Image (spheres, rainbow, N blue to C red):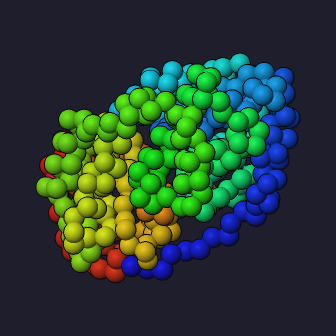
Amino acid sequence: MTEPVRRPTVPLLPTESRARAFEEALSTAKGKHLLLALRGHPDPDAIACSLAQVHIAQRVGVRTTTIGYCHELSHRENRALVKLLGVDMRKLKSFREIEPVDFIALVDAHDLDPDYTDVEGIETLTIVDHHRAQVPIKARFIDLRLDVGATATIFVDYLAELAPLDGDVEEDRRIATALMHGLATDTDDFMVARPGDFRAAAQIAEVCDRDLLTDLSRRLIAPTAMDVIARALASLTVRRSFAMAGVGFVSEADRDTIGQAADFLVRREDIDTVVVYGVVGEKAIEGSLRTHSPSVDPGAWLEQAFGSDDRGKPYGGGRRDKGAFRIPIGFLGRATDRIQLWQLVEHAAKTALLRQIGEEPGKPGGITAV
């Protein structure tokens, strides 16, 4: 494997000062409308942190805080989280679809999703994330911590300082439960948790609704996920300790099944890194990387494999043990011959991945598009 690219991190305020600085920045939106603009397909960590930021924003007098997202809640588990906790979220593409937005806030992301429109002239007030920055970032307040496994850990710190949760208050139990679930999912049930994540979990353990947390943690595999796993197994290519699999066409509603297939395949005993990819919604090549190799930096590895767009933004990103990439296919998405389109996609993906592990690709293979 090639050496990971190291990027500079954002300097942090001393630990005891970050919560107060966050509160001060939020106070700028007092009496105004703040949009929490979630990136990509919202996951439990992002959803939980949004609830926590809404809670703190209310305490400092923000008039309205809207949780917005622009891509489907594609994972069954995430839809269950929103339903069981009664999370008020608004799907939107254009910021004009809601009342005028005064400020934007980002959680579990450090740049705005490019699929949002009509965002010009709106200041990003706060950014709170645990992923390495792939692009220059700018906001009035930035807390970017690479030493935690979930953004939820950061918000537990904020709440402890600014608005401690009370187990006797239903709303507080709801937030604590969401944060614990976000912590668990983003750290693979604490298998890759850092010391700060364990401390955060201990802080909110007694406030959580244990029955609700149990319901949220029942991660059943949907039939569509099993179908994608079967396709991944059928197309699996193994090179030494690396594996890759193409799964053909996947609907946007089921795009998280690609990650579930990668989670399954990385458990095979003779591999330490796997990439599963497919065409999602006939708009983009999307893939998931999973690894337990200490020499693989997922974000850097995917950037080296697939490069960047014309703005210099990498197509892929990731964290300690997992990553993802998305490459628009443009006008090719209008092709009527799906088999031929898939052969082109698979050849391009295999070529990039084989070169990344130091092999020259042979003739393209293919699987039947579905």
Rendered view: 304 above or below 172: below
Q: Residue at x 41, y 53 (%)?
A: 188
Question: Is 294 positioned to the left or the right of 194 in the image?
Answer: left
Q: Quadrant of the N terminus?
A: bottom left
Q: Position of residue 21 (x, y in %)?
A: 83, 47
Q: Position of residue 345 (x, y in %)?
A: 30, 55
Q: Residue at x 64, y 44 (%)?
A: 156
Q: Which of these two is toward me, 216 or 251?
A: 216
Q: Residue at x 51, y 21 (%)?
A: 86
Can residue 340 be seen by looking at this rendering? no
Q: Quadrant of the C terminus?
A: top left
Q: Position of residue 16 (x, y in %)?
A: 79, 54
Question: Is 279 positioned to the left or the right of 58 in the image?
Answer: left
Q: Which of these two is toward me, 274 or 343?
A: 274
Question: Is 183 positioned to the left or the right of 127 in the image?
Answer: left
Q: Which of these two is toward me, 294 or 112?
A: 294
Q: Residue at x 26, y 54 (%)?
A: 264
Can residue 265 be seen by looking at this rendering? yes
Question: So how many labels did they put on this image?
Answer: 0
Q: Position of residue 133 (x, y in %)?
A: 63, 59
Q: Quadrant of residue 31?
A: top right
